[in-house]
């Protein structure tokens, strides 16, 4: 049985009102790359390409958004987006969504 990772993400393209699929995402613990993945048709990564252990630490998600906008023939101000966050409790799930447009983005701690 496959379990959902302790850190998950998804991307919603606010301009299109649709998930952003086929976006490469890297997950760092401090400065160490611990996992990577590509968003699925629903814009989500719930299973990373490699497993990792969640510890209380600083983490960073890096979204490679430029190829996504290029594929859509859309100009974008951003090449990539970095979201840094802290894990304090290893007993919790951390969902970090990215709401994206060519000239802005926001994020929040999801559920």
Image (tube, rainbow, N blue to C red):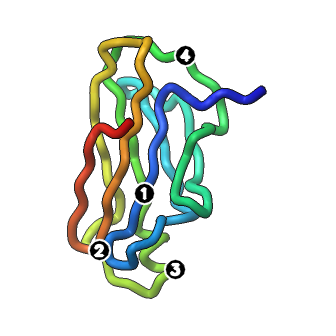
Give me the C-alpha separation between circle 3 and circle 4. Answer: 34 Å
Q: SS at mark 4?
A: loop
Quadrant housing the C terminus: top left
Badge 3 or badge 4: first in the primary sequence: 4
- What residue sits 34% from the left and 53% below the top? 98
Tag shown at residue 53: 4
Query: What is the quadrant of residue 35 in the picture?
Result: top right
Badge 4 or badge 1: first in the primary sequence: 1
Q: SS at mark 3?
A: helix
4 left or right of 81?
right
Are dots 3 and 4 in contact, CB under 8 Å? no
- What residue sits 78% from the left and 26% below the top? 1
- What residue sits 63% from the left and 25% below the top? 51
Badge 1 or badge 3: first in the primary sequence: 1
Residue at image mark 2: 102
Residue at image mark 3: 71
Are dots 4 and 2 in contact, CB under 8 Å? no
Q: SS at mark 1?
A: strand
Give me the C-alpha separation between circle 4 and circle 2. Answer: 34 Å
Nearer the observer: mark 1 or 3; the answer is 1
């Amino acid at each position: 049985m496959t379990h959902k990772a302790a850190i998950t993400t998804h991307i919603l393209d606010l301009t299109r009102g649709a998930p952003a699929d086929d976006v490469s995402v890297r997950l760092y613990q401090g400065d160490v790359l611990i996992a990577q993945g590509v968003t699925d048709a629903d814009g989500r990564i719930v299973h990373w390409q490699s497993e990792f252990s969640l510890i209380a630490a600083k983490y960073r998600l890096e979204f490679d958004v430029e190829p996504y906008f290029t594929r859509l023939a859309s100009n974008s101000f951003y090449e990539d987006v970095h979201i840094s966050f802290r894990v304090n409790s290893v007993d919790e799930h951390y969902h970090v969504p990215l709401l994206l447009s060519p000239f802005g983005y926001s994020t929040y701690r999801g559920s």
